[in-house]
Image (tube, coloured by chain):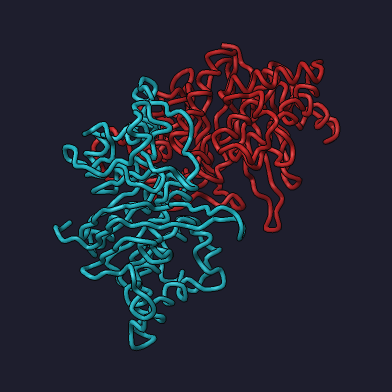
Amino acid sequence: MEKVLEISHLNTEFTTEQGIVKAVRDVSFDLYKGEILGIVGESGSGKSVTMYSLMGLLPANGKVVSGQVKMNGKDISRTSFENDKQYDEMMTKVRGKDIGMIFQDPMTFLNPVLRIETQLVEPLVNHTNMSRSEAHARAIELLKLVGIPSPETRIRQYPHQFSGGMRQRIVIAIALACNPGIIIADEPTTALDVTIQAQILELISELMDKGNMSVIMITHDLGVVASMCDRIAIMYGGKIVEIGSDREIFYDAKHPYTKGLLRCVTDPEKDDVELEPIPGTPPDLLHPPLGCPFVDRCSEAMKICKVKMPPTEKFSDTHSACCWCHQKEKLGHV
Amino acid sequence: MSDKVILSVEHLKTYFDVTPGMFSKKKIVKAVDDVSFDVYEGETFGLVGESGCGKSSLGRTLVKIYEPVEGKITFDGSDISKLKGKELAGFRKEMQMIFQDPYASLDPRMTVGEIVKEPMDIHNLYATEEEKRDKVVELIKTVGLKPDHIRRYPHEFSGGQRQRIGIARTLALNPKFIVCDEPISALDVSIQAQIINLLEKIQRERGISYLFIAHDLSMVKHISDRIGVMYMGHMVECGSSDEVYRNPHHPYTKALLSAIPIPDPDVAKKRTRIMLQGEIPSPINPPVCCPFCTRCQYATDRCRKEMPQMKQVENSQVACFLYE
């Protein structure tokens, strides 16, 4: 399969008053053409920061320390550019054109004082050779595509005149404007009600069927992941601890954190079982543990887990996990 | 769970006047409109619905943060809907509330010990400071925190731990009934399960009844004995949690259930969702008709003219003309 995005050994740090926070630690993954890759993790696990790092959208105190990002073979990593200016110039052409983004809260993403039309036409005029009138026609077409009724009149309205679900549809329309090959959706349905969430997820699946898009979907909802994603990466403490196909993650999880996470969610289809929460709280990334980030909450922790980062073990072409428990035979005496 | 009704709500109405100016046409939001249900001793009654359906307003009316416009709330045999002043303060001891946002519901300038002790001071529960202190330590241990946490401030704790502090404060008065208003929706998945298990443990040990308000249907199903489904201020279906989940009657309940994401890829990817068209209409000055008629695929002329009443259908109560 064709790789549209390759991320290797990405490290991102934030400088804060308390010290340096290592928010993303050695993250590597690929995105293939036509797939939905789910990135699952708790708040603070680094899933959003990973995306902001590869989009060049980090706040002023954040910095990509090392690592490479390749889009369709082209190097778009911050570390390959000499200064921020050159990098920003390059990324401005990429963002919205090659990679579209859908954010969690549509009300903060949309500009409240601009008409929907202005916000939809802007990326089209900036990134393509379209004239204003062509862009206007395309904008109406986009609103139709995302299921907004009477787009000709609604395009003249402001964001506050739309409901939450409709606003998220507009955000999706803006992300799709230039037919990007890659969409990054950061918690696209978290702020929405379940029935509206179902509508938006259905819309994303329909759009996937129509175009040759690849989607990275960041979420904490395992239910959403199960119904949408082809492959799933589990993040914890700034690292990807396990990655695999949907069935490999849900039915054959290898990492203790993934297993624990699956025991924390209720499946309403099945009879009630006692929930087994993961004890403790996520690690403080100001002082991350030397070894495995999950060591303090893990029931299978060994001595070595505390001091050394576990290597990645491959179980199949798609499935791998980072845990010492799969290295027991190799470790022998430990 | 016993057969004794601890809380009985009859035809409760909570309205808000949102008229923008003196001379404008009157605008009324009917947040809770003619809702009736009972909660038994030691049971968990789950309340589900989408944002704006009035589930939180209902919870807040029960603990008398909001005044009902009409209707009767009977708690432990006495009518509390008209209580005021001292009598109301006495009743508040019996019914407490856990809030959604553990970041907003704890005073940042008070230590954990002070937060948990404050309700005891207000209600003069114990004679000496020593007794109070012992009780605080006991509560802190009950909710799974360490005694040396007492001197710390809320900002030193994570979301899940803060929610535990909130629960300890709630338990300080030994209430018989707790309204849990989305207690887990601000927490991470692995922490949610911790809080749910804690709430279940407290219920087993103390026999407290819960009104559990949430929009996460799978968690509500897990924790509740019975479930009420709300839509635009009305209760549209009510029954045991298994019955509501396995055998839903109201078209809205059916759509809501089919929209729950199921954490199992084989099941989730094959499932067909009932897609509801449109969104919840504005709750300002709603017409007298079935609240769901604008989005319902079975809606008839009658639904657009009359309001359906709750009727017994099999083992649940349903407000829908389809079952007449």
A78, above or below A306, in the image: above
Whole-percent x, y for residue A94 in the image: 75, 24
Which quadrant holds the N terminus of chain B? Answer: bottom left
The C terminus of chain B - image quarter: top left
Of A149 and B193, nearer the camera is A149
Residue A6 visible in image = no
Q: Quadrant of residue B293?
A: top left
The residue lying toward the viewer, choosing from B54 and B165, is: B54
Q: As rendered, which of B188 and B245 lies closer to the eye?
A: B245
A181 lies left or right of B35: right
Q: Residue furthest top?
A: A1
Direction bottom: furthest residue: B128
- Up/down of B65 relative to B217, above or below: below
User: Chain B: what color?
Assistant: cyan
Residue at image position (34%, 71%) is B82
Image height check: is A235 above or below A133?
below
Q: Provide the letter of the chain coloured red.
A: A
- Seen at 28% across and 58% down, the residue is B9
Examine the rendering and report whether any part of residue A136 can be seen.
yes
> Residue B314: where, in percent of width, then height?
16, 37
Measuring 45% from the left and 37% from the top, which residue is drawn there?
A221
Residue B20 as seen in the image, left or right of residue B175: right
Percent across and percent down for residue B236 are 31, 42
In x, y percent, where is residue A41?
50, 39
Residue drawn at (81%, 30%) of the image: A87
Total tally of numbered discs in the picture = 0
